[in-house]
Amino acid sequence: MKSFEQSVTKSTSVEEMEQARRQLQLYDAHMNEYHHLREQWKQLNQEEVRLQEKANHLQQRKRRLESTLDEQRNLYPFLAYLNVEHWEKLYHLLVQLKEKKRTQNQMLRDKEEQLSIMNDIQKNLEAFYKMKKWEFYEENMEQQWHRLKEWVQDQSQRRQKITHAEQQLESLYKRAKENKVKQSTYMEQQQDLFKEAGVEKEDDYYTKAKQNKKHEEQQNQLQDLERQLQRMLSESEQKDYHVWTEVPEERVLSARLERLKSEKKKVEDEQKKNQQAMADNQSAIQQLEHSDERSSITHKLHREKAELQKQSEEWAAYQLAWKALEKTKHAYKEKYLPRILRKATDYFYRLTDGNYTDVKISPDDDRIKVISKQGFTYYPMELSRGTKDQLYISFRMALGETMADDLSLPFLVDDAFVHFDQKRLHLMIELFEQLSKKHQVILFTWREDLEEVFQSPHVLRLSENQ
């Protein structure tokens, strides 16, 4: 009986302990859940604070925007009767209208200036006619101008004749001056001849010239006689017979000898000076040839020649490359640009849901412009950020698809949907899925919601862990 009671007591204690252990486990589970819920509560509080700050920021932006709108409505009261979504179109219309108005004003100013110039010309023409005492009819201006044109042509022909006559006269003056200079030279030479001959008149000069010629002939005859006598008589016979009666005096011969010696000495001194100068020049040349300065200058010359040759080759290469680039650019414009514009227009039309119907290149400045379905023209800088991205992607896809005929390459897209709303994103996804049938498309993005959009079994997803 006692043992039975002990066993019952022991069994009861084990059950109590088991129950206590379960309660402790349940308590621990509740405590863990409590801590987890407390952490979630803190995170939710932090998220609520961030959302409240974001809401305050948006509220401030809303107040600033409303203040800006009120300011614009105060400045331009007609905006109060127009919805805000139409302000942008109205702005573009006003800009175009302002530009047309400015052009119109400029044309009116040009017209006034031209009319003023025409009136001045007409007044000058009338004054000219009065000066010439011609009849002037204001209602028949064409005939007046025709007559003036004939008069101008006649005056031009006369001026040409006068110019030709002046040129001929100038040529004659020039020839007369040259002849005068030649005559002066001849006169100087004539006076020198007269002075050397010791005469004052031309007749005396010719008379003396005849006398000199006769004297020379007599001297030649005398020399011939002397040679004949020397051949006929020996020296002893010449001395014995006193053949040479007219012997020059010694004094005259000595003076002539001294004069010749003096002239010889001068020529020798001049020769020595020239030889010394030539030796000095030769020495200077040798010093320059063996000096370091010459070698450095020669080395510098060769180096600069080599550099010049190298630059010439580079210039020739650049010229060839430039011509090749110009040729390639021209061929690209002729062959690919029209196709790229057609494809870009199609893609842009589809991406913008038909809001823009055409994409063109301006022939004046090669700038891209787009045409809206209302017929307005916009440049890329006037588009919104999302529309700019759509235009850029349209050109990228058109260029890749056009070039794929020669070289097929994958499309690399890096976060091209940052500024896209859901409608734009849906259109972009449809285009990429259609494009992936012919080309490989590699998309880099931080958006996790895109994973739900691409559900095709051919899509491969890569991450940093892979």
Image: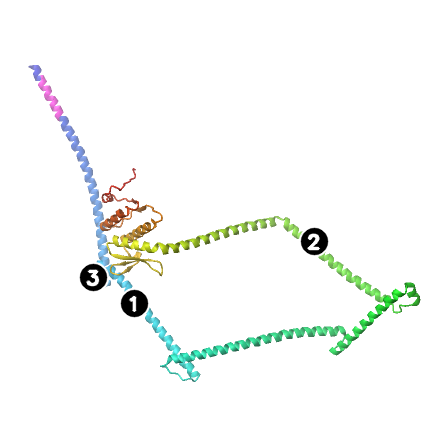
Type of amino acid under label 3: Leu
* Number of other residues with Cα within 10 Å of mark 2, as a class: few under 14, some 14 to 19, many 20 or more: few
Residue 284 x %, y %: 66, 52
Q: Nearer the viewer, residue 39 or 223?
A: 223
User: Residue at label 1?
Assistant: 101
Residue at 92%, 65% in the rendered image: 237
User: Residue at label 2?
Assistant: 279
Quick one: quadrant of the N terminus? top left
| Label 1 – label 3 distance at C-alpha | 23 Å
Type of amino acid under label 2: Ala
Query: Is 155 placed above or below 237 here?
Result: below
Residue 115 x %, y %: 35, 75
| Label 2 – label 3 distance at C-alpha | 104 Å
Q: Magenta residues? A: 6-19
Type of amino acid under label 1: Lys
| Label 2 – label 1 distance at C-alpha | 89 Å
Asked if the magenta segment contains residue 380, the reply would be no
